[in-house]
Amino acid sequence: MENIDIDEENKGLYEHLNITVDSKQEPLRIDKFLLIYRQNSSRNKISQTCRAGNVIVNGTAVKQNYRVKPGDQISVLLTHPPRENVIIPQDIPVNIVYEDDDLVVVDKEAGMVVHPGFGNWDGTLVNALAFHFEKNGEKSDLDRVGLVHRIDKDTSGLLVIAKNEYALSFLAKQFFNRTTKRLYWAFVWGNMQDEEGTIRGHIGRHPKNRMQMSVYEDGSQGKHAVTHYKVLERFKYMTWVECKLETGRTHQIRAHFRHIGHTLFNDERYEGHTPLRGVNLPKYKQFIKNVFEILPRHALHAHTLGFIHPTTKKELYFESPMPKDMADAVKKWRNYLEN
């Protein structure tokens, strides 16, 4: 059995397994076979995983009654096991832009942590949704809020959350295969040279600062990462870009743009919280200070989200408008350059 590399933004949310069936294996239903291999999984989870088309044997999706044979090559995409810590429902406002029996799409505000973890055991989006589902009498075969993907605390924008095991499995496959439609908006320091381009470079943990990620162009460390970008508007000292991720590494946009000399605006972790070097005008420095007060976080927004619905099999597509802090910063930049 072999674990396959998972994009870091989804690490812990699901796992991909490659299994070669032993030459001495007797014929056995695949749902029972997988329950033996993954004892923390339930029969319902295995059943819904098969139903979603996430169990592949010798290149073909199979149903739960398929009988495994010696030498079978099995590929399985499983949603994560139950969380150990109990999720406490909390009455926290959350911007829900779409909801049905299978899923909910949320436009997350900057500053909200997505799920509980070290240092943030409550007050998260997951706590807020647990309250929302409980208040509406939602019943689910999930023992948790069904996170499919994540974004950073200070990144704003769109997220989809599953309400049942089948929807979670179906959506997880799209994120794993990178067939979803997602675009990010970012403000980066400096005037980008090209109108559009691609940043390539392995991303791995910084050798000295463990809170940062570094780019290794030679591939000696880290994992393969590709970011495509397009310039939307130039502000002389800052550029508004649209980003499309080919991979989903931790801090991918933040690390890639810093690597090419265009750190995200006001990204303190990556030294983007000081005025652009080489500009010493007092008026400019005061202006930047004022913009930092308007936009007190790294300027990154998950602008679009598109995916195939688990039940209807139709594509859903959402766009999140630019949040107020970023929109106010744009207005201030335009006024500054005009005057």
Image (cartoon, rainbow, N blue to C red):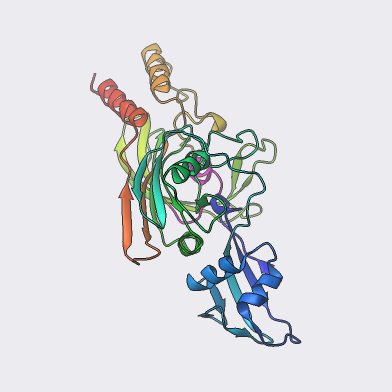
In this view, 242 is above or below 23: above
Q: Residue at x 68, y 67 (%)?
A: 38
Horizontal side, residue 308 vs residue 127: left or right: left
Residue closest to the eye, 200 or 138? 138
Question: 39 or 230, which is in the foreground?
Answer: 39
Name the image quarter holding the C terminus: top left
Who is closer to the viewer here, 144 or 184? 144
Q: Is residue 51 left or right of residue 46?
A: left
Q: Is residue 147 above or below residue 293?
A: below
* Residue 15 vs residue 130, the one in the foreground: 130
* Region of the chain picked out in magenta, as a range: 245-257
Q: Residue 184 lies in what quarter of the image?
A: top left
Q: Which quadrant is home to the N terminus?
A: bottom right
Q: Is 24 situated left or right of 197 in this image? A: right
Q: Position of residue 216 (x, y in %)?
A: 60, 49
- Please give the name of the residue rendered at 46% of the width and 64% of the height, measured from the top-left corner: 170
Q: State the image coordinates of residue 318 (x, y, percent, origin top left).
A: 32, 50
- Give the image location of residue 312, x and y in percent: 34, 66
Q: Is residue 1 visible?
A: no
Residue at image coords 36%, 13%: 283
Asked if residue 195 can be seen in this view, the reply is: yes
Is residue 254 inside the magenta stretch?
yes
x then y, percent, for residue 50 = 53, 73
Residue at the farthest left position: 338
Q: Residue furthest front?
A: 137
Relative to residue 233, is residue 78 depicted above or below? below
Which residue is painted at 39% across and 56% down in the image? 101
